[in-house]
Amino acid sequence: MVTELSDRFAVVGDFIGGLQFDDIPAPVVAHCQDLLLDLIGVAAVATTTEAGRIAAELAGTMFAAGSPGDGVGLIFDGRRLSAAGAAYAAATAIDNFDAHDGMAPCKGHIGVATLPALLSFAQVAAGCSGREALTCLTLGYELASRAGLALHESVDDYHTSGAWNTLAVAAIGARLLGLSKAELRNALGIAEFHGPRSQMMREIDHPSMLHDGSGWGALAGVTAAFLAKRGFNGAPAITIEGADVAHHWQDLGQTWLTLEQYIKPYPVCRWAHALVDGALMLKERHDLEAGDIAGVTLATFAESARLASAMPETTAQAQYSLAFPVAAALVRGRVGVDEVTGTGLEDAAIAGLIGRTTVREDARHSDRFPNGRWGDITLELTDGSILQSGDINARGGPDQPLGREAVTAKFRDYAVPIVGEVRSRAIEAAVFSMNGPDASFDALVDLLLEPIETRRKLALA
């Protein structure tokens, strides 16, 4: 039995320790850079949120560095925290601004935890090259994707992303800290055991700052790597070494699941995106105003139908809503930062349209979940005419990628108001040059750790 477990771990252990930048196909590297830039833009806004502020302040008191020289900097904040504390605070902030990447079959998110972890470990280990940073992020996407698929397949409940992206965090730490194979195996086991197996649908039904569990996933994963380095044991990770999930790991290093990560065009739950697209399409095609619309019917899959359908009072409720982002799209012609954080939460026209909205599950959309996020929207106009979008799948995934131009535009839309034009352009340049042979990750880290001088006040709770 021990030999069988070791053999199954060897595939993953060899990949984590042995993956080289030159092993990664160029399209995978390019998409990883797009994912990284997108995450940084999301983080810029996220650190201004109330959840981000609370997490950073808590980390400063409960997860502080043991001594000034031991600390690492917190993204867009600069305060010195423990490596685990900085990862926790950053991941909690990003998790609470729901515009970050994800993977459809996993029903969750990876970069939200792996970017904060990479920033922490790179500061501890020092001297990380740009190529090594991209390699670490890629192995994180590859590992967490499979761990998520394995967990969803092997348990009954629908757990949050922190339950499985924590393994990627531990793997990145093990690589950058130079852990042995035995220590790596223990780190993965510890991370899996302590990762938050929190209930996703509870958060959908009762939106809050708990969001998707990734703050605690980052905290558990970073802590696991340091525990294993000190000799703490905790192997095996069942989502890696269990015989019933072995098929998820057989193509590691051959099939690149990094390419399956989607990038969101809107800062709301992915489950609402298809309907937002449909609303924007109908609004533009027919030159609609909110007053033209007598009623809205949203047909979607079962999980999406459980998203809130009332006017939200908080950003968390706005991001886990179905009727709100669709109404915002129809009223304002966009769903962006201001819609979910500021004046959109007090817009009477949006509230009025929500009151004229009906949500229903459609079996054909449910049948295509989780691999697709399908839906359709029907508008009844005040003149009695009916407009229909037809079936729409959410954009941003491998079947309908946003493309680098759109990703960069989104980054600028998010980052420039927070950190300014000059710094935003410098971040872009650093991210897109990371694949160069002489690129240092430290240059980007320095740009990310510089505090935001003037924090924009957002109406978040």
Image: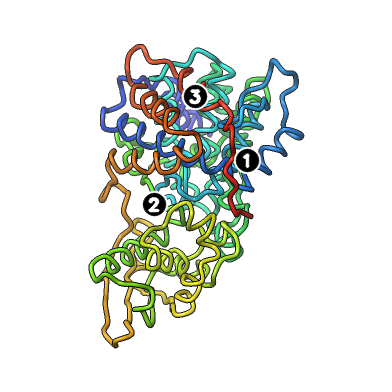
Instruction: Calculate the distance from the C-alpha at mark 1 to the C-alpha at mark 2.
Output: 23 Å
Query: Where is residue 19 drawn, in percent x and y?
Result: 38, 22
| Nearer the observer, 142 or 71 | 71
| Helix, strand or loop under label 1 | helix
In the rendered view, would you say 19 is above or below 85?
above
Disc 2 target residue: 105
| Nearer the observer, 190 or 132 | 132
- The label nearer to you, 3 versus 2, is 3
| Helix, strand or loop under label 2 | loop
Instruction: Calculate the distance from the C-alpha at mark 3 to the C-alpha at mark 2.
Output: 34 Å
Instruction: Identify the residue at image location x=33%, y=30%.
Output: 253
Compared across the picture, whether 356 is left or right of 90 comes to left
Tell me the amino acid under the disc marked 1.
Answer: Phe
Disc 3 target residue: 447
Compared across the picture, whether 430 is left or right of 457 comes to left
Tell me the amino acid under the disc marked 3.
Answer: Leu
* Residue 292 falls in image quadrant: bottom left
- The label nearer to you, 1 versus 2, is 2
Query: Where is residue 120 drawn, in percent x and y?
Result: 57, 26
Query: Where is residue 59 drawn, in percent x and y?
Result: 70, 35
| Chain-order first, disc 1 or disc 3 | 1
The C terminus: image quadrant = bottom right
Disc 1 target residue: 193
| Colour basis | rainbow
In the rendered view, would you say 410 is above or below 293?
above
| Chain-order first, disc 1 or disc 2 | 2
